[in-house]
Image (cartoon, grey):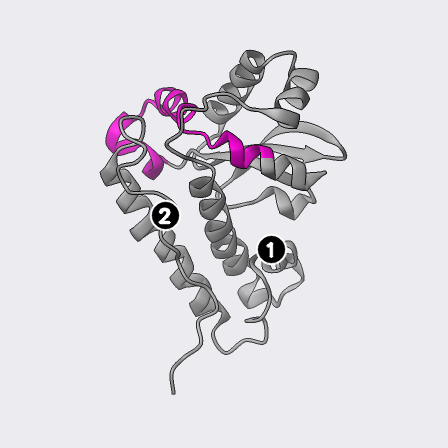
Amino acid sequence: MKKYYPFENPPLPYAYDALEPYIDTKTMKLHHDKHLQTYVDNLNKTLENSRFQNMSLEQLIYNADRLPDDISVPIRNNAGGVYNHWFYFEGMANSQLKLPVGNLLQAINNEFGSFEKFKDEFSKAATSVFGSGYAWLVKDNGKLKIITTPNQNSPIELGMCPILTVDVWEHAYYLKNYNLRKEYIDNWFNVVNWERAENNYNKCK
């Protein structure tokens, strides 16, 4: 009897080399095909023979603390790893659009003063993450906030609505940028999918 695996690793929404020269092809292949696939495989293995297979990714993350002790931490780590990576990959694009647009641009200007000030604050937050984690732009109680999360923790655990994220685990940038995380973050700003970020922001409303 074929085993049921509730989660799969979909292809990237663009070619592996689409983000060159800002994020290199080899990193994208390893990051998506190896690192993300491992989280997908481990999540499915954790859920195997459990009664939680029909829960969505968001439900698993939000309810991780309420799950049985033997799977609570693996669920948080691996469901978070899948969710965060999907959000990160889908939040990038080979686009001529290098600035936020629409309602998100207005909200950024209102909250941070200007896009350049937001960019500076976001870069500082992402650079400051100790070890592995993410920097996020989220909407929380109607306001934009920049937050960081360690490891594979996610803002949705905190009831926040994510708009965009940058992965600052070393595997996201080490092949190209070595230990120069700030250089990687500067490159990442060239491939942010601002149209998707605008859609995410509008959905948060």
**Span highlighted in magenta in the image:** 170-198
Q: Residues within 10 Å of mark 2 (few under 14, many from 20)?
A: some
Task: Indicate which disc residue 12 carries.
Answer: 2
Q: Residue 16, position in %: x, y?
A: 28, 42
As drawn, the residue found furthest toward the right would be 141
Give the label, 1 or 2, closer to the camera. 2
- Residue at 57 percent across and 15 percent down: it is 115
Task: Name the residue carrying label 1.
Answer: 58
Relative to 4, residue 10 above or below? above
Relative to 25, residue 22 above or below? above
Q: Is residue 30 magenta?
A: no
Is 145 on the left or on the right of 1, as rendered? right
At label 1, the amino acid type is Glu
Q: Residue 41, position in %: x, y?
A: 38, 63
Q: Secondary structure at mark 2?
A: loop
Is 183 on the left or on the right of 202, as rendered? left
What is the distance, in whole Å, between disc 1 and disc 2 at their CAs? Answer: 20 Å
Q: In the rendered view of the protein, which quadrant contains the N terminus?
A: bottom left
- Residue at 36 percent across and 57 percent down: it is 38
